DNA sequence: CTGTTAGCGCGTTCAC
DNA sequence: GTGAACGCGCTAACAG
């Protein structure tokens, strides 16, 4: 606000280009946007003037005039989590061809912060909005619904969306993990996880896991959750604590790969052989999981695809449909070498 | 472009709030922006009307009218690299209080793509621009200089910036690593790295390392670089290849922690004891480095701080100064347990 | 194929 | 402490 020099200097405007090429502003506008019929000769003259002046269109003005910005709001709990970074990459990739720009807001896993972020993104009149997760405040939901813009809620498809849901069923993944491990002969299951308030999807997987165990007459022989975000260090410490508590699992299911890699490290430090002494199972299919001395057994999710499909489902797809749409991007259970 | 329903529906405007509260538009505007003198009673009436209508200011229009947007362009080579994700987190944190919004463009390590990204970000009339790195096309430089907006080039401070540089000296870090390891008694150095075209900072560190070794009468006994991005898997494979080539280093310096963790995994798989058989040194100070069975010896850089300082140096700081500014965010050499 | 007219929604003057 | 007029830079409708 203290800034003075908000002067454009010699920034070229549409009018400058028009004058230089001897046509009207609207003609230049049409050439620049590749819209409407233009005589080849005119186009060339205009293009030359554009190059000469170094004209860069003011999209702020353009968006205001056409009451439709090429901005897409993206609301993520975190960007330093590789999972969301991958999603963002997918969104970028899908948006680039149409000239749309993602504008990212970060909530830090806080619903009230999400409300503030959504409000502030909405102020830029975005063409669409992509949010990670389905748990919003009432006010957030109201803004999203009233906004009339397309909205994608991504990462899981276990909940009914406002408009479009893109992701995978985490509950189903949890069930598949249980089935797979039971089939492999494991019986003494333990769980090592992180904060469910921050990551409801981890809880959905847990529920699926425990449900299916129960159907097989099994239950967890041990369980440990850290009251914070997942991390390699947390995984290492939680598995150490679990083992110290006297539990004797033959397999440990982790809330995700970060935690599982930490568990792997605990095994190395404690002289336990992963799989032979204790089997390990993760979730996400991160690169590092495949680089461990023994390839981590895990579930590979396609985060980039989630971002791509979400973006593609929203831009240039017309109005919000009557019935919510569900897009399942699936997952692959990778047997690996640690379970 | 195919979208029909770009209709605002019943979106409340400044005029609606004004009518409802019985004052003029400009008064509402002042209340909403907390600017100018307002009678407490008026403010309250207006605020009530704002709440009632659910009014959200149109920042597009606001920016156009005041010819100054609260957007900050951020140009990054990648978002799925934790290093840049951390930087982005810092930028977000520093920008949030002043209501500025970062708009991110991703170049995928391509200079021509950077040019396109910069052009398209400039079209949103950002208040400032933050770019990772110093190597731009001539056209990119020209746009940045002509734009009159504040520009930060971040990550290293080994090159003269257009306006502000924020980061650390990678060449100096390379020299410090060499000095540290020589002091610890290591003599047979090897290097395992990744693509220098994508990451010039890795090369600066390499240069510093080799220079200092030479001053001590030493040189690398082995060296391996993958022609692609860094990754745990690449680190593992490159160290394996290096050892297979017959080199017998007593310490391996990696281009970064990802590569070093991969090297650690190779040691485990090959039955080599990290440090006792072969010492390992990384760069960045990632969380995972501290979670390994032996804490990785590395250099901790403060990526979030880089983002914060860059953002703080630009917004609300007036015009571009005559002389470029250099902000050194420093680094800490962490001795660790692997070297 | 090209131009004219009339805003988009708000903030900056100034005046009162 | 409040308001009226004008314009930010561009594009949607029409004409021609």
Image (tube, coloured by chain):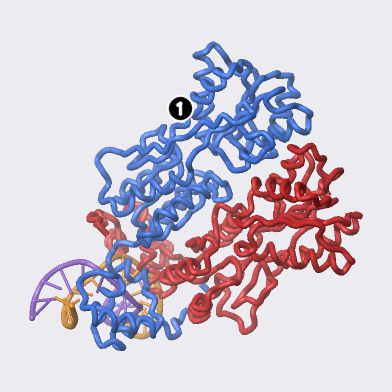
Chain colours: A blue, B red, C orange, D purple
In the foreground, B24 or C8: C8
Is residue B229 rendered to the left or right of residue A46? right
Q: Quadrant of the C terminus of chain A?
A: top right
- Residue farthest along the top direction in this orientation: A217
Residue A297 drawn above or below residue A70? above
Q: Quadrant of residue A228?
A: top right
Closer to us: A213 or B263: B263
Residue appearing at x 73%, y 24% in the figure = A243
Residue annotated with mark 1: A172
Q: Can residue B312 be seen in this view?
A: no
* Chain identity of mark 1: A
Residue A15 place in picture, x, y as percent: 31, 83
Residue A215 picture location, percent across and down: 49, 14
Tell me the crowding category of disc 1: few under 14, some 14 to 19, or many 20 or more residues within 10 angstroms, Cα based.
some
User: Which residue appears at 55% of the width and 80% of the height?
Assistant: B319
In the rendered view, tell whether residue B331 sits above or below residue A160.
below
Kindly state the secondary structure of the residue where label 1 is placed. Answer: helix
The answer to which quarter of the image holds residue A7 is bottom left
């Amino acid at each position: 606000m203290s800034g003075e020099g908000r002067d454009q200097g010699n920034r070229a405007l549409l009018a400058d280009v028009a004058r230089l090429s001897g046509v009207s502003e609207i003609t230049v506008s049409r050439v620049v946007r590749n819209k409407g019929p233009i005589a080849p000769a005119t186009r060339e003259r205009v293009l030359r003037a554009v190059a000469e002046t170094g004209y860069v269109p003011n999209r702020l003005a353009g968006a205001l005039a056409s009451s439709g910005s090429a901005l897409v709001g993206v609301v993520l709990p975190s960007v330093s989590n590789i999972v969301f970074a991958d999603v963002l990459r997918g969104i970028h990739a899908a948006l680039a061809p149409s000239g749309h720009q993602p504008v990212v807001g970060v909530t830090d896993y806080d619903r009230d912060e999400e409300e503030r972020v959504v409000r502030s993104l909405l102020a830029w009149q975005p063409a669409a909005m992509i949010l990670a997760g389905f748990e919003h405040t009432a006010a957030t939901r109201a803004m999203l619904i009233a906004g009339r813009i397309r909205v994608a809620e991504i990462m899981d498809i276990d909940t009914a969306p406002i408009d479009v849901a893109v992701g995978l069923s985490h509950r189903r993944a949890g069930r598949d993990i249980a089935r797979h491990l039971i089939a492999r002969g494991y019986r003494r299951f333990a769980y090592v996880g992180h904060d469910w308030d921050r990551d409801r999807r981890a809880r959905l997987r847990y529920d699926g896991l425990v449900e299916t165990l129960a159907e097989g007459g099994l239950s967890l022989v041990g369980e440990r959750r850290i009251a914070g975000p997942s991390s390699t260090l947390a995984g290492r410490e939680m598995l150490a604590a679990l083992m110290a508590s006297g539990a004797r699992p033959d397999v440990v299911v982790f809330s995700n790969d970060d935690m599982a890699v930490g568990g792997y490290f605990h095994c190395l430090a404690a002289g336990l052989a992963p799989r032979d002494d204790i089997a390990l199972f993760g979730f996400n299919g991160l690169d590092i999981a495949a680089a461990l001395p023994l390839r981590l057994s895990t579930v590979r999710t396609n985060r980039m695809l989630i971002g791509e499909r979400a973006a593609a489902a929203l831009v240039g797809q017309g109005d919000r449909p009557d019935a919510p749409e569900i897009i399942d991007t699936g997952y692959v259970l990778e047997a690996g070498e640690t379970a």
